[in-house]
Amino acid sequence: MATQKETTPDIQVSAKVVYIPSESKPDQGYHFFAYKIAITNKGSAPAQLMSRHWTITDSLGHKEEVRGPGVVGVQPKIQPGQTFEYDSACPLNASTGSMRGHYYFLGESGESFSVEIPEFYLIAPHALQ
């Protein structure tokens, strides 16, 4: 399980990825990855995650853009010192790829700001052999 982190002055984002062999069909070019995101508010004011934008790229050159409100059906308000975690998944048609993007937040006084989601890699274990 790999972990990458990106820190902004107030919001820290980290990702852990795991390959799910039971959901994958490598002989059919289908690879399933699960990932856990942790978003920590290191600031002194609450911040609400309003939307997300992902760029998912596989080693075959296929790129997919994913945009939407919140994450996993919620728009969490993260208090100072709190961490919000969620699990999600990403299927790929290649054994390796990467994900990166931005979260868009609303601050306590109504200001909008974005936080970079650091690029993290989706690598099936057999791709390293």
Image (tube, rainbow, N blue to C red):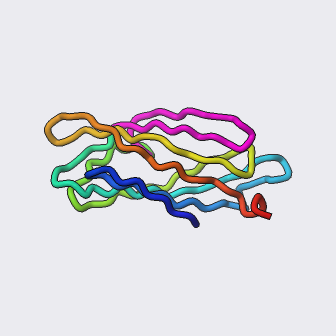
Residue sitting at the far left: 109
Q: Is residue 54 left or right of residue 82?
A: right
The percent position of residue 123, horizontal first and vertical second, equals: 67, 56
- Identify the residue at horizontal 74%, vertical 46% (top origin): 94
Q: Is residue 7 above or below residue 106?
A: below
Q: Is residue 10 magenta?
A: no
Q: Pick the quarter of the image with the C terminus.
A: bottom right
Tell me which corner region of the image, top left, top right, bottom left or bottom right, holds residue 7.
Answer: bottom left
Q: What's drawn in magenta, residue-wise?
A: 50-71
Q: Residue at x 40, y 44 (%)?
A: 116
Q: Specify whether residue 57 is painted magenta.
A: yes
Q: Horizontally, is 61 left or right of 46 in the view?
A: right
Which residue reaches farthest right? Answer: 27
Residue 117 location (% of width, % of height): 44, 47
Q: Is residue 11 above or below residue 93?
A: below
Answer with left or right where residue 33 lies relative to residue 60.
left
Q: Outermost residue, bottom direction?
A: 1
Residue 127 vertical position relative to residue 51 in the rendered view, above or below: below
User: Total of numbered circles in the picture?
Assistant: 0
Looking at the picture, tell me which residue is in the foreground, 85 or 60: 60
Residue at 47% in and 41% down = 101
Residue 59 screen position, x and y as percent: 71, 44
Q: The N terminus appears in which quarter of the rendering?
A: bottom right
Q: Quadrant of residue 86?
A: bottom left
Up-down relation of residue 59 to residue 112 (above or below): below
